[in-house]
Amino acid sequence: MRILHRYILKEMLKTLALGLASVTAVVAFGMVLRALEDHGLGPFTSLLYMVLSMPKAAYFALPLAAVLAGTLVYGRLAAQNEVMACRASGIPLWSLFWPTILLALVASGGAFFLAAWPLPASAYAAKRLALADIERLFFTRLASTGRIRLKDANFQMTVDRVVGDMLYGPTLKYRGREGGQTYCYAPFGRVSFDREHNRVKLALWEAVVVDEAHAVPVRGTHAVGLTLPTAVPREEDDLALWRLMAWQRRPELADRVRGLPEDASDMAIVNAKNKVRARAMADLHGRLAAAIGCFGLVLVGAGLGVYFHSGHLLTAFGVGLVPWMWAVGATMFITARVAREYAHPEDLVWLIWAPNLQVVALGLAILAYLSWVWTSPLRLRDLLRGRRP
């Protein structure tokens, strides 16, 4: 590798690292703000949540940093006439793009590494951390949205206002032990938590109760006790790549299937297995395709940086974001579509790869155009007209 190539590669790696660090910090901070709003995290928990959010933030920031690195470095080379000097020295333009190929491999490998294990592991740990303080989460949900729903416990409650542990205007809907639905309204109520047994107790005063089983007095003080669900089942996006492949081959290993009731019908078990298999296949191919798309984005950024020279680097970066948005949006939409195709998801897998392969083809086409067409337009025009140069 020539000194010039090493210089270009060093500048691109430096720009990639700085861009990745800055964009990752911004994205992680935004994720923490959203978690604060949804879960009401404490100060120390917020810092820990931000650390756990770093891999996910870096995974989303890596394509942006890759486009930025290629655009800035090659745009600066073109703006300072260094590309023209290389051509005058007999160095072909295509040889200057070897550092781009190497950086594209580094960015693609980084995206693959993050998607293989750190991204799903940290996302699952952050999810468990956000649900660890169930008492804080309970009051935060009530204070911010005025309602809370526990699907596993078949419980739903709305309130008008929350002050401390006091509830004003609580309305409950839950399924009692006898199996019937119970509806309850009270002007006042109080919440207490039993951390040792992980239970919440609601005391509702002057409550009006409508009980389908007729096992609860219609009026008076009404008490409700619930065991809070703290188990966080693993979804397909919480799994490393090797576990995704294992779930795809043996869907009975999934938490979704193992969590079915013992008296579940054979049809319900088969449907759950097909759902796990389809989602695991879609998520697996989505992560691999995104790594390939990151490879193409580096090529696109470098090519646009050379083409939009003379101080138009922001224009080049903005144009380079268009294929990134297309690849990300199309991949997410198609992955969700394949995940819902429970019968034959393998028939639609190629659609997940299509947008990212298009980005790679676009990057290669831009570099080829710059190397063999853009550098000698007069010669190409003469050849098209049938003249000799």
Image (cartoon, grey):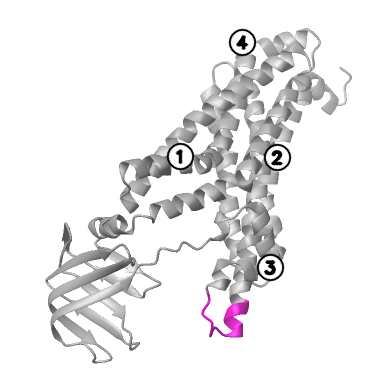
Residue 290 screen position, x and y as percent: 63, 46
Q: Which mark is residue 275?
A: none
- Location of the C terminus by quadrant is top right
- Give the mark nearest the N terminus, 1 or 3: 1
Question: Is residue 294 or residue 254 the one in the foreground?
Answer: 254
| Residue for badge 1 | 51
In the picture shown, does residue 190 fall above or below 115?
A: below
Whether tag 3 and tag 4 are in contact, CB under 8 A, the answer is no
Q: Which residue is mark 2?
A: 360
Q: Secondary structure at mark 3?
A: loop
The Cα–Cα distance between marks 4 and 2, rounded to whole angstroms, is 28 Å
Q: Which residue is mark 3?
A: 250
Q: Name which of mark 3 and mark 4 comes first in the sequence.
A: 4
Q: Is residue 121 magenta?
A: no
Indicate whether 121 appears above or below 296: below
For label 2, count other residues whose C-alpha is less than 10 Å away and answer few (under 14), some (14-19) or many (20+).
Answer: many
Q: Quadrant of residue 323?
A: top right
Q: What is the magenta range?
A: 260-270
Q: CA distance from mark 1 to mark 2?
A: 32 Å
Q: Residue at x 71, y 64 (%)?
A: 346
Q: In x, y percent, where is residue 217?
A: 17, 88
- Compute the Cα span from label 3 to label 4: 58 Å
Residue ID at (60%, 70%): 275
Cα distance, mark 2 to mark 3? Answer: 33 Å
**Sequence order check: which comes first, mark 1 or mark 2?**
1
Residue occupied by mark 4: 80
Q: Is residue 387 left or right of residue 102?
A: right
Q: Report the front residue among 179 and 280.
A: 179
